[in-house]
Amino acid sequence: MIDRRSFESLGGANHGWLDAKHHFSFAEYYDPQRMGWGSLRVWNDDTIAPNSGFPAHPHADMEIITYVREGAITHQDSQGNRGRTEAGDVQVMSAGSGIRHSEYNLEQGQTRIFQIWILPNKRGGTPSWGAKPFPKGERSGRFVTLASGYEADTEALPIRTDARVLGATLKAGETAEYTLGKNRRGYLVPAKGKVEVNGVTIDARDGAAIQNESVLRVTALEDAELVLVDAA
């Protein structure tokens, strides 16, 4: 089953400095049919104006993955971590027992991100943060694991949950496959381009909520950049 969630159907709010779209219920947007997808709790599509951002605020017991689509985001937190993550790269924050952080667009142009929250396997633990460049060339024509809760994914950023976050870039006409597995849920969003997922057309920034599909076959109808979460 693949449930297409059109971009136009998403919740959201425009705060001037932040234009946010929510794939799931978040902040003042509430839809009882869109409370999450398995352990995936939040997928926000944020456009942040230059020289603005989120001031210091707390989190606990959440794995927070930020995929930068355009521009860059600068992170600082109460553990002393600081870093700048550019378009095509990923940062991960394990909130653990509690952490305060800020996220700012200090660039001259707008920054666009996907921010993804996944519930951890257990509560508590020491907070952590990390970022990693993932050149698009390495994702050409296939899915690459960007963040993972599995020890076997040694090249990925670690998260404390039974899930993977994957990325792929496809040229028009190219196809990539991913084995989702039994009793797993997938959520796929094209950052750019139109694709077909097991026969269902998904436009740029639409969401595809996937279950009971053991293998995903994704064909690009246009040049496309994809992000996929594989969650319990």
Image (spheres, grey):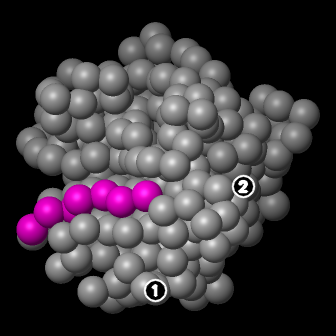
Tell me the mark number nearer the camera, choosing from 1 and 2. Answer: 1
Q: Quadrant of the N terminus?
A: bottom left
Question: How far is the residue under mark 1 from the one under mark 2?
Answer: 27 Å
In the image, 150 versus 119, the foreground residue is 150
Name the quadrant containing residue 94: top left
Q: Disc 1 marks which residue? A: 200
Residue 121 spot, x, y in % from top left: 11, 45
Q: Classify mark 2: residues with Cα within 10 Å, few (<14), some (14-19) or many (20+).
A: many
- Of helix, strand and loop, which one carries label 2? strand
Which mark, residue 146? Answer: none
Q: Is residue 59 left or right of residue 72?
A: left
In the image, 59 versus 89, the foreground residue is 89
Q: Disc 2 marks which residue? A: 47
Compared with 167, 96 (above or below) is above
Q: Is residue 15 left or right of residue 167?
A: right
Residue 97 spot, x, y in % from top left: 21, 32
What residue appears at the point 73 percent right and 44 percent down from the top-left corner? 70
What residue appears at the point 65 percent right and 56 percent down from the top-left corner? 171
In the image, what residue type sits under mark 2? Thr
Compared with 169, 68 (above or below) is above
Q: Magenta span has 179?
A: yes
